[in-house]
Image (cartoon, rainbow, N blue to C red):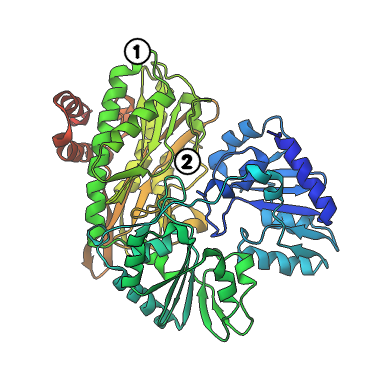
């Protein structure tokens, strides 16, 4: 296999041959998925050797850079070491945004190249407007990564679709199509283009297997006032799914036909989210059409779970909590043996989850990271690259399961032996932030960025930060990372929190080459009292697993935090203990008993 530097060299040869001055390789697939994609689309990783799920590569005649965010800085440093690629730390002082960098570095009368199928219409338009002032051009039909990859490039996935029954979703496809059309009517749109992978799955109550740990299929959807068109490779549609589609009047079209069909639209009012519509598809739309560039209504529908989805998700968390408690008990019993590794631990957790009723797959690759590996927020242990677990310090385990009744995401930082005073202090500071968000009481209209400080304050008081959001939305048997809701400071967390939404609560500390600490639960947004001030709201915790009591420095907790902690542990024991063996149950009782000063 050729090296990273050789791949960059081959791209530069193609650039020279095609007279392109600067080349852009984003992380996205042709649905502009921001994180998890099928191996076929991992061009950024192929060219750079950086395996993190976020970022982009930009190549000029004399420079090659990899942009990624704070979750991946430590990982990227290690994976880029010894290559010709420079790490560009997103949102850090002195580091330009990649789109701004492309504009700056494209020379006058020059040419910027990229594959328009994986670049959003928004970014392509911004680039085109800026480069026009330089008399520079864009070429968006250049898939140089694919050309260098050649016959070794993975194939597009071809797994079959399957139907998720109404007992799990709470609504038929007919009801969901009607909700979408009602939103279109209210918006004044006669055509809706759906490009997010989760949207067609949600509307039609179907799921796929095209992306590891995310049960979606590579498909587009077009909804009009009278028709529903679903674009997918036909080999993925079984007889059962064909029958399901026919029942709801869904016309199946070839995956590659969407562009041609878009080109036939004239004088339509088209609702399309240009952040997730590719530049290549956008270029097929006739100028006579009016474009409503707003978030798809389906994203909001997906985010606000109905009663059936909520009840099912809670049930999934109970099963998941039992698996996690069994895992924690096992770790505690075996940590001192000396033969545990990150891989053996994560494999055992996979086995425990798989025993749960209606289990499908992990909701993302498990992060099982001992001590300094925990500082890499999205670290993955492999058979080729992993660490032994020693009887001291912390093991960070971030994991989750996709069940037919719900999706889970949980992190526990586990004491596998003696802890230092610093480790206990930092763990407790993270716990204080975690409890601060968990116990939030707020008025309707509050967004995640209004609440983020509750989780960060104990760490900010120590001049410590975590370079990521505090929480993300979670899909229902879909992506483990879902918007529009999130808990993050700045513009990223500006979606109003609605009853029925789910967000994670996961503050952390990451000290490079030393340790990582993260504590994560899922929180359901619920309505509280309504009075003349407005509608009050709070969170209901739907994750059931004890915290690491060995790591808690009780003197750092105030009375309110201690009461919240003890109430949560009481709930964990009551909820999970019926599913445990006697020894596991006894252990859970011991670690969830009320903590006193």
Q: Nearer the viewer, residue 322 or 536?
A: 322
Q: Residue at x 64, y 63 (%)?
A: 123
From what the image shows, is residue 569 above or below residue 126? above
Is 490 situated left or right of 44 in this image?
Answer: left
Residue at label 2? 460
Is 135 situated left or right of 487 in this image?
Answer: right
Is 499 situated left or right of 38 in this image?
Answer: left
Looking at the rendered image, the disc whose residue lies closer to the viewer, 1 or 2, is 1
From what the image shows, is residue 44 above or below residue 422? below
Neighbour class for label 2 at 10 Å: few (<14), some, many (≥20)? few
From what the image shows, is residue 165 above or below residue 178? above
Q: Residue at x 50, y 34 (%)?
A: 379
The image shows a total of numbered marks equal to 2
Residue at the extreme front of the image, as rendered: 239
Q: Is residue 556 visible?
A: no
Secondary element under disc 2, as helix, strand or loop, is helix
Residue at label 1? 337
Give the image quarter of residue 328: top left
Question: Whole-percent x and y of residue 374?
Answer: 47, 30
Give the image quarter of residue 164: bottom left
Query: Quadrant of the image for the C terminus?
Result: top left
Question: Whole-percent x and y of residue 27?
Answer: 59, 50
Please tell me which of labels 1 and 2 falls first in the chain. Answer: 1
Secondary element under disc 1, as helix, strand or loop, is helix
């Amino acid at each position: 296999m050729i090296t990273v530097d050789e791949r960059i060299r081959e791209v530069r040869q193609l650039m020279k041959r095609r007279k392109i001055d600067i080349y852009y390789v984003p992380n996205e697939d042709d649905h502009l998925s921001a994180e998890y994609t099928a191996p076929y689309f991992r061009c950024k990783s192929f060219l750079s050797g950086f395996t993190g799920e976020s970022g982009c590569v930009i190549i000029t005649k004399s420079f090659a850079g990899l942009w990624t965010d704070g979750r991946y800085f430590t990982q990227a440093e290690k994976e880029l070491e010894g290559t010709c690629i420079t790490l560009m730390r997103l949102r850090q002082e002195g580091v330009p945004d990649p789109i701004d960098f492309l504009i700056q570095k494209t020379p006058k009368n020059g040419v910027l190249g990229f594959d328009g199928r994986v670049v959003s219409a928004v970014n392509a338009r911004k680039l085109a407007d800026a480069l026009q002032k330089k008399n520079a051009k864009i070429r968006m039909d250049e898939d140089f990564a694919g050309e260098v990859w050649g016959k070794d490039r993975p194939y597009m996935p071809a797994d079959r679709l399957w139907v998720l029954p109404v007992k799990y979703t709470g609504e038929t496809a007919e009801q969901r199509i009607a909700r979408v059309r009602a939103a279109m009517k209210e918006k004044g749109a006669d055509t809706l283009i759906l490009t997010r992978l989760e949207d067609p799955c949600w509307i039609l109550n179907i799921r796929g297997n095209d992306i590891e740990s995310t049960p979606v299929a590579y498909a587009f959807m077009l909804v009009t006032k009278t028709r529903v068109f679903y674009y997918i490779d036909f080999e993925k549609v079984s007889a059962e799914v064909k029958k399901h589609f026919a029942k709801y009047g869904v016309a199946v079209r070839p995956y590659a036909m969407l562009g041609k069909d878009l080109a036939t639209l004239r004088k339509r009012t088209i609702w399309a989210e240009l952040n997730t519509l590719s530049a290549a598809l956008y270029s097929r739309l006739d100028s006579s059409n009016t474009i409503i560039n707003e978030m798809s209504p389906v994203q909001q529908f997906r985010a606000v779970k109905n009663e059936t989805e909520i009840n099912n998700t809670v049930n999934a968390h109970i099963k998941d909590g039992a698996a996690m408690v069994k895992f924690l008990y096992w770790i505690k019993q075996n940590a001192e043996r000396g033969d545990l590794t990150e891989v053996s631990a994560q494999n055992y957790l996979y086995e425990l989850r798989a025993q749960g009723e209606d289990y499908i797959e992990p909701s993302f690759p498990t992060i099982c990271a001992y001590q300094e590996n925990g500082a890499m927020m999205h670290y993955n242990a492999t058979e080729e690259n992993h660490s032994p677990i020693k009887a001291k310090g912390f093991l960070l385990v971030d994991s989750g399961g996709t069940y037919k009744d719900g999706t889970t995401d949980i992190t526990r930082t586990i004491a596998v032996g003696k802890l230092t005073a610093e480790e206990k202090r930092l763990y407790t500071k993270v716990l204080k932030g975690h409890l601060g968000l968990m116990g939030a009481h707020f008025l309707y209209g509050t967004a995640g960025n209004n609440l983020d400080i509750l989780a960060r304050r104990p760490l900010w008081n120590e001049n410590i930060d975590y370079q990521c959001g505090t929480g993300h939305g979670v899909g229902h048997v879909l992506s483990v990372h879902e918007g529009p809701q999130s808990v993050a400071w700045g513009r990223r967390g500006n979606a109003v929190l609605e009853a029925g939404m789910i967000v994670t609560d996961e503050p952390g500390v990451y000290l490079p080459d030393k340790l990582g600490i993260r504590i994560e639960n899922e929180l359901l947004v619920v309505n509280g009292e309504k009075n003349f001030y407005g509608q009050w709201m709070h969170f209901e915790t739907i994750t059931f697993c004890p915290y690491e009591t060995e790591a808690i420095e009780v003197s750092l907790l105030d009375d309110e935090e201690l009461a919240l902690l003890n109430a949560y542990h009481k709930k964990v024991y009551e909820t999970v203990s019926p599913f445990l063996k006697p020894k596991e149950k006894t252990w859970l009782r011991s670690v969830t008993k009320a903590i006193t000063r």
